[in-house]
Amino acid sequence: MKTNTKYIFVTGGVISGVGKGIMAASIGAILKAKGLKVSMQKCDPYFNVDAGLLNPREHGECFVTHDGAETDLDLGHYERFLDEEMTGDSIWTSGKLYKCLIDDERAGKFGGKTVQLVPHVTGLVQKTFIDNSKHFKSDVHIVEIGGTIGDLEGSHFVEAIREFPTKVGRENCLFVHVCYVPWLSTSEEFKTKPAQNSLRDLREFGIIPDMVVARMDVDKVIKAPHVAQKLATFCGVEADAVVLMPDAKSVYEVPLNAVKGGVLAPLERFIDHGDPDMSQWEKLVKNIEAEPKEVVKIGLVAKYIDNTDTYLSVTEALKAAAWKAGVKLRTIWVDAEKATDADFAKVDGIVVPGGFGARGVEGKIAAAKYCLEHDKPYLGLCLGLQTAVIAAARRGGVKQANSEEFDAPAKARVVYIMPGQKGKESTGGTMRLGDYPAKLKAGSLVESLYGEKKVVERHRHRYEVNQQFVAEIERGGLKVSGTSPNGELVEFVEAPDCKYFVATQAHPEFKSRPYRAHPLFEGLIRAAKSA
Ligand code: GLN
């Protein structure tokens, strides 16, 4: 098969959690800065078909793509680093792969053939690479393989990438292995043995990488020629193809650190496309490092405060807004189950993020009530709109106001289940998901923040505002400031008497970029700054 597309495969070794995804996305950002069209995909070994039903405490945020897929938080990194919208097919889990194959087998699509790991599973994996690169019309398609090399459950992906060069040409494939090189404080030396072992494991699959990224326990880019030389010798790569990567204070330093660490030499041997223009990243890092004096404290009233990755896009969106507004952000985690007015009083602004289930919801409603009554800046995201509406309805005289989600028999269901959603509460991929447009009311705060009358945001919800209660909600201090184009669904509410009280049924955090703050988050930070 002839191809103009180049493919980069990123594997990990030694331990997980050393930033393989960030490194893959940074390589993508560097190539994009060279003017190339870059796309990315993740191959994740787990058997869940998608991340929709996974517990966020265990798995972190469920990132929603514009086309409505419930995916892994890595896709959020890809979007923030590449500034490209991923799709549902930017991630392939083993579950999704096997489901496709088994569905095809049951539909009789294999013409009587035995369906096997090789070539059918591996062939489908390879087809996803080609389909993605075609969809995005990319010059370079980057594939991150989840987990670490040697994991039994990821081996079909590794076999697929091992075979792939025979189909598209070895010269069109670059293998990058990201491994960890620990520092042994007793003998004061870096130990390359675990990395060597992981490279040997990779070799056993038949893959000799073209670039080795050594993640090291140091806080700045260093030259450690003996480490690079040793890894190069043992792995059969050129010494300048070993890139030493220190810990970074912010993930957004990684593209610049990668350039400083020498990533360009092996990349340019693979694809030569001029110097990258890294000015956007330099500007961002300068902003991040600026350490402004003025501190803005934002309280995140949430349920999973023991795994803050659950709200990753929200915290990244807050950071981006703070960098833009030139303030130092301090995020205060407020346990929704224990939250009191004293917690709300301590902060300059409050975010109630998305969530599911009754646990902690009264704390979130109390946060909205407090903000309405004390003119405290509030941003409600999805569930955060629903809690605001409940708080307002209660203030407006509907004492029993609640959501059908938390109190199914409640008489005053000011938030109720959308038609067609009933009975699907624990099934995957069935919510109102992905991009939906909203029209904003003329003269509303949201209209002035967005600077547009029609906006599109990503969604992930089953419940909606019951518009029979609009009069009471308005009496309680909120007005509807945006709806679906046909007016049937409430998309935005705001409090005309408050400086900044905005809530949306959507998840605007997914569209924030580190260098392009989202207007709703920027609005919150600016209001909190002047509080
Ligand atoms: N649980 C609410 C619903 O399903 C809110 C969902 C969310 O915050 N993503 O409508």
Image: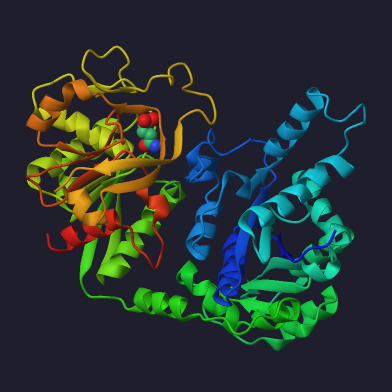
* Image side of residue 97 versus residue 350, left or right: right
Quick check: can you spot residue 401? Answer: no
**x then y, percent, for residue 471:** 11, 26
Residue with the most extreme right position: 113
Relative to 300, is 36 on the left or the right? right
**Who's the residue at 30% across and 69% down the image?**
324
Tally the numbered discs: 0
The N terminus, quarter of image: bottom right
Quarter that holds the C terminus: bottom left
Ligand 1 occupies quarter:
top left
Location of residue 212 with respect to 229 vertically, above or below: above
Q: Position of residue 34 (x, y in %)?
A: 58, 77
Where is residue 134? Give x, y as percent. 68, 55
- Image quarter for residue 291? bottom left
Residue at 37 percent of width and 46 percent of height: 456
Give percent across and percent down for residue 80. 48, 61
Instruction: Report which quarter residue 385 is drawn in.
Output: top left
Query: What kind of colouring is applied to the model shown?
Result: rainbow
In the depicted structure, whether residue 68 falls above or below residue 85: above
User: As drawn, is 531 to the left or to the right of 323?
Assistant: left
Which residue is more in the foreground, 74 or 360? 74
Say left or right for 418 vs 295: right
Q: Can residue 529 be seen?
A: yes
Quick check: 306 above or below 409? below
